[in-house]
Image (cartoon, rainbow, N blue to C red):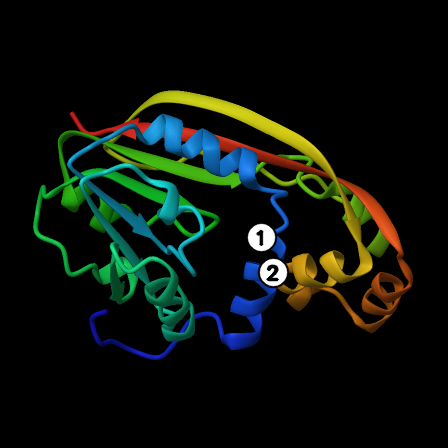
Amino acid sequence: MRNGGAHGDNKEMVKARTAFLESGAYAFLKDKLVQLAGSPDTLADFACGEGYYTSGMQAKDIIGIDMSKDALIHAAKNYPSIRWVLSSIFDAPLEDESIDVVLTCFAPFAKEEIERVLKPGGRFIFVTPGPRHLYELKEALYETPYLNVHKDLETSLSLVHEETISSSFLCNNRQLSHLFAMTPYAYRTGKRGKEKLSTIETLNLTAEFVIRIYQKS
């Protein structure tokens, strides 16, 4: 694990996300990403977190990059065969045109770095929440729930594939608290909404994701 700045998710957020992901609610997304990524020589996961999605990849050389030291300590302990790098995805310590596949899940598009490190013909897999991702949770917490907005990327890469996948799952209160802690809602929700969350015993939720694949010409 390469040294770098101590930023990103803290221990509590890493624990919450790990506990939720271990429930298997997002396993269908992980399986889909493994299928789409295939078996390239090199794969870099930009903003890999604790390595849940990274760990399933089938590349010969896998690199996970994140700014959270706590997340990468967890990742290195559980997945020692993968190279973990403590760094900003906007200043990745990778050589030009050295990566076959770059993956980014639920993180900003590091345009310049991704375009720089991809080999000619290399692919960028970008995952964002779908319009109705966790909509039932928004209905429970907010007076005016909203759909997520799908934004096009400004990039020299060519869009070659796009699909939306979804799955439903049942969350108990403990799982809901873990899920809430790992989403932006934890910062955007006021005291009243958080009090509502504590009263929910179970909730059926929809996980919906948009997967886009871009290619470097």
Depth order, front residue of 60/108: 60
Residue 157 lies left or right of residue 200; in this view the side is left
Q: Residue at x 41, y 68 (%)?
A: 74
Q: Is residue 156 above or below residue 106?
A: above
Depth order, front residue of 47/20: 20
Residue 76 lies left or right of residue 1; in this view the side is right
- In the picture, the quarter occupied by the N terminus is bottom left
Give SS at disc 1: loop
Q: Quadrant of residue 174?
A: bottom right
Q: Amino acid at mark 2?
A: Ala
Q: Quadrant of residue 179?
A: bottom right
Please name the residue that numbered disc 2 is placed on: 19
Residue 13 appears at what percent x and percent y? 56, 69
Depth order, front residue of 173/115: 173
Residue 52 visible here:
yes
The crowd level at tag 2 (other Cα within 10 Å; few <14, some 14-19, many 20+) is some
Please name the residue that numbered disc 1 is placed on: 22
Residue 8 appears at what percent x and percent y? 43, 70
Label 2 – label 1 distance at C-alpha: 5 Å
